[in-house]
Amino acid sequence: MLQKIDHLGIAVKSLDEAVAHYENVMGVPCEKKEVIESQKVRTAFFAVGDTHIELLEPTSDDSPIAKFLEKNGEGLHHVAYYTDHLEEQLKQAEEAGCRLINREPVPGAGGKRIAFLHPKSTYGVLTEFCTKDE
Ligand code: ZN
């Protein structure tokens, strides 16, 4: 079952510039920065209430974020929902006819396991399910 919106992912060209923006303009301190090898991104997280903003900068030209920036420029990249049962959530989505990008969970930021649904199946919004195993 979905529990909450865990975070909003925003694609940026320069993580350092975007981090400075969030710290100076929005007044929220950066919680952590992390490189996610499996997604070829460098991320920075900001807590806003009980949800987060995740800034994403590509670490290579073949990163999905590099392709996104090329096509769309900077901006909202994905919405991530926290679920207590990731495999079940994926199975339910697939059985309901949704196209999945990840049929199996992959490692995400903060030790979470994540999987993406295809934006063509989710009204144009790349959708992430994430969970943290106890
Ligand atoms: Zn995310």
Image: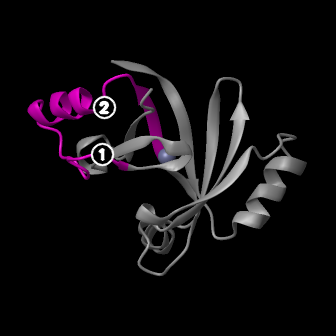
Q: Circle 1 — which element?
A: loop
Of the image marks 2 and 1, the number of the one nearer the N terminus: 2
Which residue shows up at 53% across the image and 48% down it?
109
Question: Which stretch is magenta?
Answer: 78-106
Query: Residue 134: x and y, percent?
Result: 45, 26
Which residue shows up at 64% across the image and 42% down it?
53
User: Residue under circle 2?
Assistant: 86
Q: Is mark 1 within 8 Å of ligand 1?
A: no
Q: Is residue 95 magenta?
A: yes
Q: Is residue 124 magenta?
A: no
Front one among 75 and 1: 1
Q: Is residue 63 above or below residue 10?
A: below
Q: Across the whole image, how many numbered discs are drawn on residues?
A: 2
Q: Circle 2 — which element?
A: helix
Alpha carbon separation for disc pair 2 and 1: 8 Å
* Type of the residue with mark 2: Leu
Can you say which quadrant of the picture contains the N terminus? Answer: top left
Query: Residue 47: x and y, percent?
Result: 71, 34
Which residue shows up at 22% across the image and 27% down it?
88
Front one among 108 and 72: 108
* Type of the residue with mark 1: Pro
Q: Classify residue 13 by image quadrant.
A: bottom right
**Label placed on residue 92:** none
**Label placed on residue 105:** 1
Query: Residue 31: x and y, percent?
Result: 75, 43
Q: Is residue 1 above or below residue 18?
A: above
